Amino acid sequence: MNFNQTQFLAAYGTARQLPPSTKPEVVFSGRSNVGKSSLINKLCMRKNLARVSGQPGKTATINFYGLPELHLVDLPGYGYAKTSFAEKKRWAELAEGYFAQERSITLLVQLVDFRHPITELDRQMLSFCTERGLSFLVAETKCDKLNKTEHVARASALAEELAAYSFTACIQVSSQTGEGMEELRGAISAALS
Ligand SMILES: Nc1nc2c(ncn2[C@@H]2O[C@H](COP(=O)(O)OP(=O)(O)OP(=O)(O)O)[C@@H](O)[C@H]2O)c(=O)[nH]1
Ligand SMILES: [Mg+2]
């Protein structure tokens, strides 16, 4: 699959606007600022395909990116503390609206920050994926930010935090160094076949 041919397709501000699935969808979910947009850029070997920002809550729409074989779906991030009630409602409408539809979700990539314990909202999302029987994998982001000792400690702690959920793979990734990208591309290709 030629990930570098990915093109931006559209941004949707409400779930109602979403067109029916026309291709298998690979969905990226995770809390605000965890690195979803950065991961999509690195995965596709592109600098500015998805908007990245140090300010959480950058992606406030559901963004679709197209490859010949599939669509990549960038969901807005959840759980940013300073988000207003109205914005939280908007997130819920978008994300819940997306999952309430009959969509051909081939794979969900759940991003969690490698450095920190998973949050309550991460757990809710992981439970949702597990209960719904979605095929999903966990991408542990920003793994470049830890030294070797911290890395080992977090890897085993995170394995315990994630033990209750039925994901198919767990991949340490970095959008800085590119770590884990080949594995992630392989998992996406495998999910399609
Ligand atoms: N060091 C490091 N920084 C990263 C990595 N991934 C993302 N970042 C940084 O984290 C910040 C947020 O990244 P985004 O990709 O915008 O995060 P997002 O999940 O799309 O955020 P929302 O759109 O708000 O939901 C940016 O400053 C990125 O440069 C990574 O793997 N390593
Ligand atoms: Mg984003």
Image (spheres, helix red, strand yellow):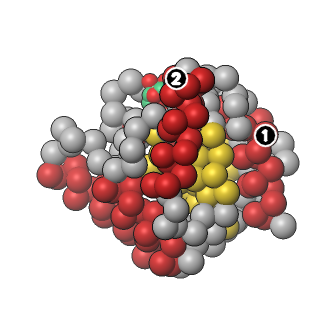
What residue is at 67 percent from the left and 57 percent from the top? 169
Q: Quadrant of residue 58?
A: top left
Q: Is residue 127 left or right of residue 177?
A: left
Q: Is residue 178 left or right of residue 119?
A: right
Q: Quadrant of residue 188?
A: bottom right
Image vertical order of residue 30 relative to residue 107, above or below: above
Is ligand 1 within 8 Å of the beta carbon of the residue shown at mark 2? yes
Which badge, 2 or 1, is on the more N-terminal residue?
A: 2
Label 1 secondary element: helix
Q: Residue 100: give x, y in percent of width and height.
A: 43, 76
Residue ID for mark 1: 182
Q: Residue 130: give x, y in percent of width and height.
A: 51, 72
Q: Quadrant of the C terminus?
A: bottom right
Label 2 secondary element: helix
Q: Residue 175: give x, y in percent of width and height.
A: 61, 29
Label 1 Cα crowd, 10 Å radius (few <14 / some 14-19 / many 20+): few
Figure label count? 2
Q: Is residue 89 left or right of residue 25?
A: left
Q: Residue 158: give x, y in percent of width and height.
A: 50, 47
Residue ID for mark 2: 145
What residue is at 85 percent from the left and 48 percent from the top? 1
Q: CA distance from mark 2 to mark 1?
A: 20 Å
The kind of residue tagged 2 is Lys
What residue is at 48 percent from the left and 78 percent from the top? 131
The answer to whether residue 132 of the structure is visible from this angle is: yes
Q: Which one is in front, 113 or 61?
A: 113
